[in-house]
Amino acid sequence: MQVNIVNCLFVLDSEKNDNIRKNDIKKIKVLVTKDRKLLTIKYQGKNMKDDLKSRLKDILGTEVVHLEQVYTFASEDKVDIVYLGVGNISNIKNLDDNFELVDFSVKTNKSVSLGTDLYKYKTIDIEKDNNIEYIHEIEAENNIKETLLYLLTSYKRIRANIDISDIMFKFLPDSFTLEDVRKVYELIKDTSVDKSNFRKKIVKYCEKIETEQDTKNGYRPSQRYRFKALKGDIWLWF
């Protein structure tokens, strides 16, 4: 039986807003091949995470990617060990011509989009051995269904952990505004939050960076921050 390492890499991209005083428009993209397949490498019996990091460095030109194992899918002829990846577009230096970054989103109305294509899905709860297992059924052709299933499962992990871990900051560049953090949170959760309350809860994880006045446009830009890990802190703000 063949054992594979499969990577679901989610990257935060930003589109410039015409109004320079407003935040850039945030979007999530995923790494796929030209035929919408995920990065897959054969397990060599060594360190899976290191092997995946090395391959991603060849594809992206960077090692600045957060990786964590999320799920194992088994069938009659193969086992796929799925790793979730998170990064920022600014760290990607040289994207391999065999891959591309395409738009991705998951809506609360039970739809998932990949590129310009939209797919409906539903989640079924199955009780097994006193545990609840969640099965996603996606309305898609067989050639794309596996890609969507792995992406959806990994993205749900991000959503589940965003309030109890620092994974949200893995999407951000080295410096950011508090508004950037809120926009990323709302984008991933497909929701909206109170600006003031969110700022109060998140600012303790952010360290101020000195910013200079924009003399060309005559105003001081928004305060920028870097992520500040708090030793021994419990992540839970909502």
Image (tube, helix red, strand yellow):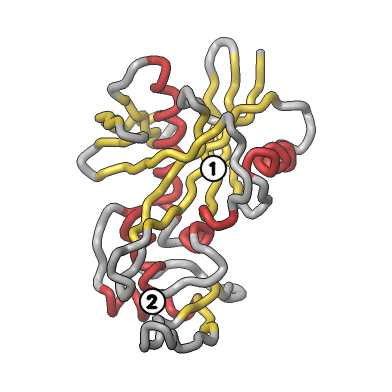
Disc 2 residue type (three-letter): Lys
Q: Secondary structure at mark 1?
A: strand
State the image coordinates of residue 101 (x, y, percent, origin top left): 47, 40
Front-most of 141 and 19? 19
| Residue at x 40%, y 51% (from the top left corner) | 160
42 on left or right of 214:
right
If the image is split into quadrants, where does the C terminus sit? bottom left
Disc 2: which residue: 201
| Residue at x 54%, y 74% (from the top left corner) | 226
Q: Is residue 37 above or below residue 179?
A: above
146 on left or right of 188:
right
- For residue 21, which quarter of the picture? bottom left
State the image coordinates of residue 149 (x, y, percent, origin top left): 41, 29
Disc 1: which residue: 84
- For residue 84, which quarter of the picture? top right
| Residue at x 20%, y 41% (from the top left corner) | 109
- What residue occupies the far left of the structure in this picture? 109
Q: Is residue 91 above or below residue 20?
A: above
Q: Is residue 91 above or below residue 221?
A: above
Classify 10 Å Cα crowding around label 1: few (below 14), some (14-19), many (20 and above).
many
Disc 1 residue type (three-letter): Leu
Residue 152 seen anywhere in this rendered image of the structure: yes
Classify 10 Å Cα crowding around label 2: few (below 14), some (14-19), many (20 and above).
few
Q: Is residue 184 above or below residue 201?
A: above
